[in-house]
Image: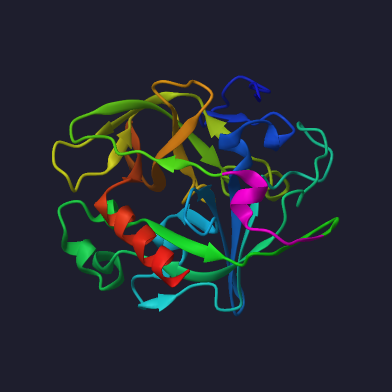
Amino acid sequence: MPVPVDAPDENGYQLTADPYGGATWSRVTGKMFVIDDASAQACSGAVIRSTHRNLVLTAAHCVYDQKTRKWKGADELSFVPARGEDSTGRNKPVDQEKYGVWTRKKAYIPPEYEDGSSAKATHPDHYDIAVFTVEDHAKSQGGSIDKPIEDVVGGLDPQVVPAGGSVQGRLVGYPGPPRYADEDEATQRYCALGVWKAGTDASSDLRNEQACLGYDGNSGGPVVVRDAKDAGVWRVVGVLNVVWIKGSWHATGAAPVSDALTALIARATKDG
């Protein structure tokens, strides 16, 4: 299992130890490339267990523009699990696409997010969650991969944090500019275990008010927790989607695993 390469930096992140495939939470987490015309966006995501073994979890704002009511990634939306740095740096060089480049088939978001009603809700970030299916084959530096993504890297099981509850969670992903230079944004990072608290009602988000702050590029990255009975098993409880900074107070928020996600998984499973 990977161990910290360094102590947490000023942003609360630690470098994931190479190779990224050394633990499930690292191997299933990847970088997303979302390209529309001349614009490009980077996000993070994670493979979750599903019937067809082809499902990636991320934030809704990574795949859908709520203002324009248009889907993102018209030119390209691809997912690269455990994408690594390919230049000399603090991490030794690793294979950038060891587990392949996977192309999106179809994305799913909650209707509350798609129609914009979540913007009027008490907790709008609750619905900023999405899943998308990927093709059953991928390109890789060694040629091609002709089996479902879950067969290649595994997947996380979703877990609900009850209203008012809390868990020790680890945020994983690919934070980039402006906090990290362009040459570092291919590097997977994580925040050490911290307390993620659920609100007191069912539509709340998860919130971490400790040292770690999520940054651009890490949106959609999973908050993972150890299984209560098996410390070697990791589960996902939410995805990073918002950061609040008000003077000296700051917090990182995540859209929680909830009935909204269950419904998305059911829709994706039905479509195949």
Q: Quadrant of residue 131?
A: bottom left
At 72% across and 50% down in the image, what residue appears? 99
- Pinpoint residue 134: horizontal percent, then vertical percent: 57, 64
Q: Judge whether 156 appears above or below 71 on screen.
A: above
- Pinpoint residue 172: horizontal percent, then vertical percent: 53, 38
Split into 4 quadrants, where in the image is the N terminus?
A: top right
Pick the front one: 108 or 36: 108
- Pinpoint residue 109: horizontal percent, then vertical percent: 36, 65
At 46% across and 24% down in the image, what residue appears? 193
Pick the front one: 22 or 123: 22
Q: Judge whether 153 appears above or below 16 on screen.
A: below
Is residue 222 toward the left or the right of residue 9 in the image?
A: left
Is residue 189 toward the left or the right of residue 247 in the image?
A: right
Is residue 266 rendered magenta in the image?
Answer: no
At 30% across and 39% down in the image, what residue appears? 160
Q: Judge whether 173 appears above or below 138 on screen.
A: above
Is residue 208 toward the left or the right of residue 4 in the image?
A: left
Is residue 110 toward the left or the right of residue 136 in the image?
A: left
Q: Which residues are magenta?
A: 144-154
Is residue 147 rendered magenta in the image?
Answer: yes
At 46% across and 66% down in the image, what residue appears? 63
- Pinpoint residue 208: horizontal percent, then vertical percent: 34, 32
